[in-house]
Image (cartoon, grey):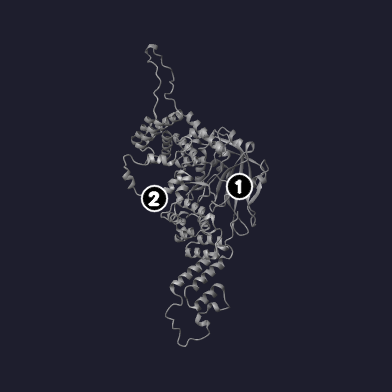
Amino acid sequence: MSTVQLPFEWAVGGKPPGSGDDYRILACSQGLLSRDDFEEIRTVYTIGTSETLPQVVAAWVGSGDDAHLVLAIQTWSDEEDRRHRKIARTHYFCVPYARITQSPCPVSYEDLYHVLKGCPLPMDGQFAVHVPTLDSGAVAARVNGTVMSTAALLMTGQHVCVLGGEAVPMEERLRFLDTVAALLPYGMRARLTVSTWASSTAEHKIRLAFTQHVPARTYPITWGQLAEIPAHEEDAYRYLALLARHDPDAKLVDWLAARTEPLTFGRNGRSRALDLLRGFSLSSVPALMPPPTSAPPLPPTSALPPARPPAQESLEGLLTECADVLEHGSTAELRDVLGRLDGIVASRGQLISDDERARCQKIIRDRLLLSPKEGLPGELETLLHEVVRVAGYGVADAPARPGEITREVAQPAGMSATAIVRQPPPDPVASMKAAYQRGREELEATLRPLQTRDLVAMAARQPPDMRVVQIIRDELVKRGGDSAEDPEIADALREHGYLTDVLGALYSAGDRAQFDVLLDLLRAAYGPELRTKEFEEVLLSSGGRSGVLVAAAVTLFGTGAGEAVKKSALNLVRGSGLDPEIVDLVKKLLFGSESGVSHLTPAESSGKKKRFGDRRRDRPLIPPLTLYLLMIIFAVIALVEFFMLIPAPGR
């Protein structure tokens, strides 16, 4: 295995043991990067503190000749702060980007981590270590549909998060991030930031990270599954189609690793990345017949047949061949015919007539080329749909209207109009998810006519669906953003227990994710803060079952939540028709009393001895239903007091 020697500057982030200070840079090397530079790196790439460490962030700083790659390794120290909380230490390592690209082959994030994790810091000045160069064969062997579609999703320019990876070991997550990066031109690492974990609520600039739920303006992908790429993200579809065409191997990984020109994730940078990948496609097209090692003797000129131009394959013929291969052929044959079809489309461009398009669309419709294909690998199905769409509908630069394609391909051949009318109405959840795929305008048009109560009922369905809950949460936040209170949202959420059962199932790995979603829902229903009556509604709805809902309600109510719970309890007791003596007893229990009074029964506190005993002795002092409600209220009070005592986590 070859290695390259690289120089590193370093810094240590944390807090002094026993202090109540915030996290900061404690020590750093004295080189091109100052303490202020490292402090900026620490601030920008703060990911929060996971309960499970170590975690790794790969990032960048600077530009041009000053550009550096950054690797941050966060671990637990053996020290505690003033509140007896463990202190996390973060080691930052920075290497000039130019030094990496000067080597014959660049390095991977994973190899940087394995070399640097054992470096003791602080140390005197800068240091240099040998790092293994990129093993393209090992990287290519890890490529799968999830990796390819994640790389393509980065071509949207949006941040991307990976869900469902909580049980995946950190080094495997880092390996996944490394493999995704290997399917981009290496120059994009000059602007790429990835993390093996990031808090969904921390303010950071991580472009690709493992999280527990989806932050705002972020595209999600679930671990082990293909990314759902919205239909309007044409660059992402094209990139995925190009990757799928070549079934990425070591040759492609090496070729992309050699493209070290720094690129951004802006429009120009993404267009350049697409051009580079197309360049590999053109350079990797094999010759029809390899040249012989030794030239055979030439026949006499008279024996040669008259020259004729090679036969030109037609779009219609290739579409028909594609359909035949789907029925009887192999995936290798399908890749071959799709490659030829794509080549014809690219060479002819705008020269395809409307009549020819219509004939192509008929083949697509009759042979159901755009219908789901069982057993076909996801990335190959994406390639199929991309190439066929362009061939039949000319969507090279702008997507066709989704309805235009749907009308042509969704109806099985031979289905009568009567049969279509008799079809059951589409499931609104399925329609919503399909609209999400087609883009924001389609999704908004689908959600607009739906009633709020229906939306919340859809979110409450079992088994819960992460995508549906995220879409509906965003829609409720949007609907509740114009006023301080939206009774329709509040009533719908209350009817379904504020979705606590669904959220508990979806975010079982962490209460913080549930807490953030519940905060959004409560704000949509009640505005930026809860009043006492609304506070009572939420607490009674929780029934003491959801501590996370109680925490969200306490947060929106603010100071005095504990007293508000007590007053709510007293109001409930007063309205239950109980004996005034019992109401008085509960009041004293909640708000305190003179010495010894709270331990007396109503009969004892009157000071009179019952000569013939208490005629109500044979029935309970408090009816069972009221007792049950009181138990719930006291449980809620305990939860509120517990949450009010929890100190804010240090950062």
Q: Of residues 353 and 590, which is closer to you in this image? A: 353
Counting from the top left corner in percent of width and height, residue 46 is at 59, 49
Q: What residue type is disc 1 on?
A: Val
Residue 463 in which image quadrant:
bottom left
Counting from the top left corner in percent of width and height, residue 338 is at 41, 33
Counting from the top left corner in percent of width and height, residue 115 is at 57, 42
Q: Badges 2 and 1: C-beta atoms under 8 Å apart?
A: no
Q: Label 2 crowding class (10 Å Cα cut-off): few <14, some 14-19, many 20+?
A: few
Disc sitting over residue 44 in the figure:
1
**N-term mark: 2 or 1:** 1
Q: What residue type is disc 2 on?
A: Asp
Disc 2 designates what residue? Answer: 427
Whether residue 300 is visible to the viewer of this picture, yes or no, is no
Q: Secondary structure at mark 1?
A: helix
Seen at 44% across and 74% down, the residue is: 623
Q: Of residues 393 and 590, which is closer to you in this image? A: 393
Counting from the top left corner in percent of width and height, residue 277 is at 50, 33
State the CA–CA distance, disc 2 to disc 1: 43 Å
Seen at 50% across and 82% down, the residue is: 603
